Image: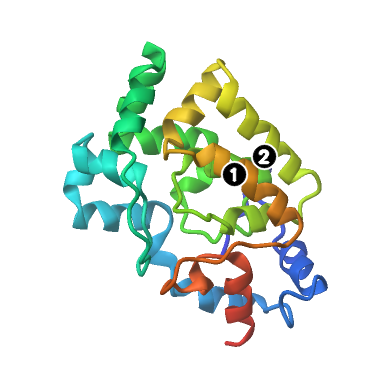
Amino acid sequence: MAIRIPFLWVDHRPRVEFYARQGLVTQSPTDAQLAKAFSEMSTQVGILGQLIYYAKNPKMIFPSAAKREFVDNPRVTGDSRPIEDVSEQVSQQRAAQAPLDRFLFWLFLFAPARLAAKSIYNPWELVPSAGLNTPAGCLIAHILQTPHPSPALWDLQVIHPDEGALDRLERRVDEALLGRSTAARVNRALGSRPRQFEELKELIPRVRRFDYPPQPDGTDEKFLTLVGFLRYASEL
């Protein structure tokens, strides 16, 4: 289920047991149950998931109009919500960006450049994983640099049990919103979905309170939230 590399691996059991203690999961799933549940989603994550996706959607490798729309409006299977038309507003905002920010945004629309940059900050990007063994620092980079469909709860739920991890994420979100450092610019260019960081600022306090917003109608929570995944795994 996990790779064990010094400084790049954490024990998943405390994270799993945290949700059992909170009463959100009836009982902690065993490692065998976790592995069985993960096998159902293993081809959707990590480098394998990306290779499969781009093999089916080769036009998305390049910085095309379709790729810009995908980054601006990421979707999950079964998401019945209408796509918000923000193209004009977003175009105006990007036109007002500093030249370096615009360059990084266009550079990271090219899939190999995007994967290379994300892997520097988080080597687990290359590994098919549920994130349970991924250190909080790597997951924070992933949260900032990936335009997940909203509400993106999985990774926030993974790091919630780690002391101070949500506070660290909140500080990094503020830096991504306002910072002028190279790291802040890279995070903005990679996590480029409109209002992504503003939504994270609203979501983090809710995660602290276990006040999770619902997923879109028709979507399967067991592969969209860690709590849903743990509940499902515990029943296998």
Disc 2 and disc 1 in contact, CB within 8 angstroms: yes
Q: Is residue 226 above or below residue 121?
A: below
Q: Is residue 220 above or below residue 192?
A: below
Q: Which of the 4 image quadrants contains residue 28?
A: bottom right
Q: Residue furthest left?
A: 59
Q: How is the image coloured?
A: rainbow
The amino acid marked with disc number 1 is Leu
Identify the residue position indicated by label 1 in the image. Answer: 200
Residue 113: % across, % down: 34, 32
Residue nearest the observer in this picture, 175 or 32: 175
Q: Which mark is residue 184?
A: none
Is residue 137 shown to the viewer in this render?
A: yes
Picture quarter with the C terminus? bottom right
Q: Is residue 181 above or below residue 86?
A: above
Q: Say which residue appears at 31% left-offset and 44% top-offset.
A: 85
Q: Is residue 49 above or below residue 92?
A: below
Question: Would residue 3 be found to the left or right of residue 106 on screen?
Answer: right
Residue nearest the observer in this picture, 112 or 88: 88
Question: Would residue 64 be found to the left or right of residue 125 on screen?
Answer: left
Residue 73: % across, % down: 35, 48
Question: Would residue 128 be found to the left or right of residue 74 on screen?
Answer: right
Residue nearest the observer in this picture, 72 or 132: 72
Residue nearest the observer in this picture, 106 or 122: 106
SS state under label 2: helix
Q: CA distance from mark 2 to mark 1?
A: 9 Å
Q: Which mark's residue is nearer the viewer, 2 or 1?
A: 1
Counting labels gives: 2
Identify the residue position indicated by label 2 in the image. Answer: 169
Picture quarter with the N terminus? bottom right
Crowd class of label 1 (few under 14; some 14 to 19; many from 20; radius 10 Å): many
Residue 123: % across, % down: 51, 42
Q: Earlier in the sequence, mark 2 or mark 1?
A: 2
